[in-house]
């Protein structure tokens, strides 16, 4: 087109040769900038307006194609020609991988630290809240004693009876003794790599390189499998349900169905049950107490609820569950519920008459919530006699067993439960299940008046059934 001859002459003056040490990206940017500059310049010429140059874009394209046989010399011929093209990409992607690796390592350190701190917090919380319950019981006793002392004098009989009948559970002095630790802050979500931020993934390439021209050999791929924990199958995480205990029992209802209520010996699921004997299958009597599952947990529906046929069925060893992130290095044990004999203590201790002096070995039991420990004795002294410390074998706790192998033996096996709180002027339920002597479950019933036996349940690994 003769009308555009001036534009063609301008294009012919473009230098298409690469500059010294000029990378491919820099060359393209320089060429495009130059051509765009000429396009703007030529479209504004009055020459084009007077000579009706109608295809400016087409002429510039033609001009650009004239450089094609020259630009091929700066295109990477293979992946080994990194130089000024792939080096910046490799540097940026490697830096991104190091950032992801640093974030993952920081989260793993935090994860380990949080689990350790949480375990310590739970131990301290249980100890402090148990001390608070003990002090509440002591304060109730002190207030009653003060009331009795103040009753001396005129009309003492009526005043004394009033002191005995008075309920101090809601007294201000008693409530100030209660310790409620609350709940720790929740664990941060597990660190994961988003596909769009992982070099080497299609999502990452699409986000950062989709605008680049086609036909150029690919740069060497940088991957972040190690940084994101994808190459180590032992470090994978998954959501699992773990058992957690109930919170502290209290005298007021708790507005949640995730927990338990009790009235005397009767139980009912839900921490919001009306304190009425009809609510406890007509089996309850006396005051009520309530315990809820901790925050972010829920009642374990596999822990069978109480019923009209079994109104005294209380919370088992796994009353609540919580969803947590756990490493799957070692498979978690599959837990199951089994039926077993459970015992409730009446009086100072539970006695079993072995018929004659017997030598025993280890004694174990599954403690019910609220029982801190069970003292174990082998003695020749019966229920009417004083319990001698010479026959003391040791304590059963959630983590320890009692060993009677070093004792000379005795006719009576004695288990004495100790609560985590206080029994002063209040109700206590001292219970345990699955008593084993030398790893054999004790089938014999306790002596009358010292304890009762009932069918209960415990949670055990499925392999031990």
Image (cartoon, grey):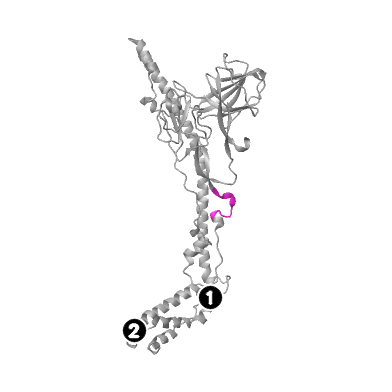
Quarter of the figure that contains the N terminus: bottom left
Residue 365 place in picture, x, y as percent: 58, 28
Q: Tag 2 or tag 1, which sits nearer the N-term?
A: 2
Q: Residue at x 45, y 83 (%)?
A: 62
Give the image location of residue 444, x and y in percent.
62, 22
330 on left or right of 107: right
User: In the rendered picture of this protein, how many numbered marks are placed on residues?
Assistant: 2
Q: Is residue 78 above or below residue 304?
A: below
Q: Please state if 453 lies on the left or on the right of 145 as rendered.
A: right
- Residue 155 is labelled as none
Report which residue position mark 1 lands on.
75
Specify few, some or many for label 2: CA neighbours under 10 Å numbering under 14, 14-19, or 20 or more: few
Q: Residue at x 45, y 77 (%)?
A: 31
Bounds of the magenta segment: 228-237
Residue furthest to the front in view is: 309
Q: What crowding class fits label 1: few (fewer than 14 Cα within 10 Å), some (14-19), or many (20 or more)? A: some
- Within the magenta stretch, is there residue 232? yes
Q: Quadrant location of the C terminus?
A: top right
Q: Is residue 114 left or right of residue 382?
A: left
Q: Is residue 317 above or below residue 161?
A: below
Q: For numbered disc 2, what is the local secondary structure?
A: loop
Q: For mark 2, what is the residue?
A: 45
């Amino acid at each position: 087109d003769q009308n555009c001859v001036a534009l063609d002459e301008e294009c012919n003056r473009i230098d298409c040769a690469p500059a010294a040490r000029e990378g491919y990206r820099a060359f393209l940017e320089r060429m495009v900038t130059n051509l765009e500059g000429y396009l703007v310049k030529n479209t504004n010429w009055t020459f084009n307006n007077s000579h009706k140059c109608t295809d400016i874009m087409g002429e510039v394209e033609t001009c650009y194609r004239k450089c094609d046989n020259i630009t091929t010399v700066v295109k990477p011929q293979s992946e080994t020609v990194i130089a000024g093209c792939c080096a910046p990409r490799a540097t940026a992607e490697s830096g991104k991988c190091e950032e992801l690796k640093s974030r993952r390592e920081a989260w793993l350190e935090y994860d380990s630290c949080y689990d350790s701190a949480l375990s310590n917090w739970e131990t301290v919380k249980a100890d402090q809240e148990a001390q608070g319950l003990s002090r509440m019981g002591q304060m109730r006793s002190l207030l009653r004693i003060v009331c009795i002392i103040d009753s001396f004098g005129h009309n003492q009989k009526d005043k004394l009876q009033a002191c005995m009948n008075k309920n101090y559970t809601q007294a201000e002095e008693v409530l100030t003794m209660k310790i409620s630790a609350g709940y720790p802050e929740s664990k941060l979500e597990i660190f994961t790599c988003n596909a769009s931020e992982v070099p080497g993934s299609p999502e990452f390439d699409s986000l950062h390189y989709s605008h680049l021209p086609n036909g150029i050999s690919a740069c060497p791929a940088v991957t972040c499998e190690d940084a994101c924990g994808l190459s180590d199958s032992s470090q994978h995480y998954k959501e699992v349900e773990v058992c957690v205990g109930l919170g502290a029992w209290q005298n007021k209802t708790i507005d949640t169905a995730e927990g338990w209520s009790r009235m005397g010996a009767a139980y009912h699921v839900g921490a919001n049950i009306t304190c009425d004997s009809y609510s406890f299958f007509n089996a309850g009597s006396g005051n009520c107490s309530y315990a809820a599952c901790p925050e972010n947990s829920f009642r374990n529906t596999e822990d069978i609820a109480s019923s009209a046929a079994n109104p005294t069925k209380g919370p088992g060893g796994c009353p609540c569950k919580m969803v947590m992130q756990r490493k799957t290095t070692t498979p978690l044990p599959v837990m199951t519920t089994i039926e077993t004999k459970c015992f409730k203590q009446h009086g100072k201790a539970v006695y079993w008459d072995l018929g004659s002096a017997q030598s025993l070995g280890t004694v174990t039991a599954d403690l019910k919530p609220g029982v801190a420990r069970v003292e174990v004795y082998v003695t020749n002294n019966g229920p009417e006699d004083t319990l001698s410390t010479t026959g003391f074998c040791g304590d059963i706790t959630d983590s320890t067993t009692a060993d009677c192998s070093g004792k000379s033996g005795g006719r009576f096996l004695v288990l004495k439960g100790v609560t985590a709180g206080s029994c002063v002027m209040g109700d206590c339920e001292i219970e345990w299940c699955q008593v084993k002597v030398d790893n054999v479950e004790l089938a014999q019933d306790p002596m009358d008046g010292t304890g009762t036996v009932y069918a209960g349940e415990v949670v055990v690994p499925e392999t031990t059934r």
